[in-house]
């Protein structure tokens, strides 16, 4: 009788084990089938993705080269603009520094010309009056 009870317990334990394992095995089989489909799809799509990635990388590298060239040209241009700015500042400083003395020189020259023209007019009137009046 003990053997029969042991056999019954063993059969029950086996039935419970099978009852739990069968759904797990079925789910595992479905998962493996889906994984196989995924791997098949990935193996067919992966080469095209790699080609696209290479093309994109080449495009990005070309853009980076163009950006470097643009930055180099901009640096040269900005350096030239800076040199022009320095030249303009030097000319401005020269004009400001010498502008006062230049103005004094021009005023002196104008005053000298006025004085000379006044003297010439007086002499012409004086000499002209003698020749016409006498």
Image (cartoon, grey):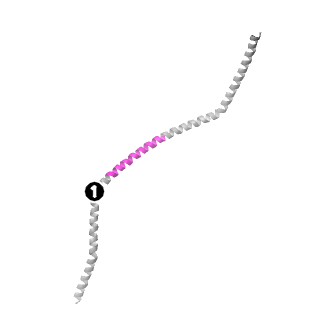
As drawn, is 65 to the left or to the right of 29? right
**Which class describes the residues within 10 Å of circle 1: few (<14), some (14-19), or many (20+)?**
few
Residue 71 counted in the magenta span:
yes
As drawn, is 82 to the left or to the right of 97? left
Q: Is residue 114 above or below residue 89?
A: above
Q: Is residue 59 above or below residue 32?
A: above
> How many callouts does the rendering have?
1
Residue 36 at x, y percent in the picture: 27, 63
Residue found at x 28% / y 70%: 28
What element does badge 1 sit on? helix
Residue 93 at x, y percent in the picture: 61, 36
Q: Residue furthest top?
A: 134
Residue found at x 36% / y 50%: 56
Front residue of 115/80: it is 115
Front residue of 19/80: it is 19
Residue 99 at x, y percent in the picture: 65, 32
Q: Is residue 37 above or below residue 112?
A: below
As drawn, is 22 to the left or to the right of 130? left
Quadrant where the C terminus is found in the figure: top right
Report the span colored magenta: 51-75
Residue found at x 28% / y 57%: 43
**Prevalent SS, magenta region:** helix
């Amino acid at each position: 009788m003990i053997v029969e009870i042991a056999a019954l317990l063993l059969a029950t334990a086996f039935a419970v084990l099978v009852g739990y394992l069968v759904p797990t095995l079925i789910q595992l089989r479905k998962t493996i089938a889906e994984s196989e489909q995924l791997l098949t799809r990935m193996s067919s799509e992966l080469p095209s993705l790699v080609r696209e990635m290479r093309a994109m990388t080449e495009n990005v590298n070309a853009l980076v080269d163009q950006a470097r060239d643009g930055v180099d040209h901009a640096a040269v241009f900005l350096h030239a603009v800076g040199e022009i700015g320095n030249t303009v500042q030097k000319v401005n400083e020269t004009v400001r520094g010498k502008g006062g003395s230049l103005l004094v020189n021009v005023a002196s020259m104008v005053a000298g010309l006025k004085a000379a023209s006044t003297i010439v007019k007086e002499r012409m009137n004086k000499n002209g009056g003698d020749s016409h009046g006498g």
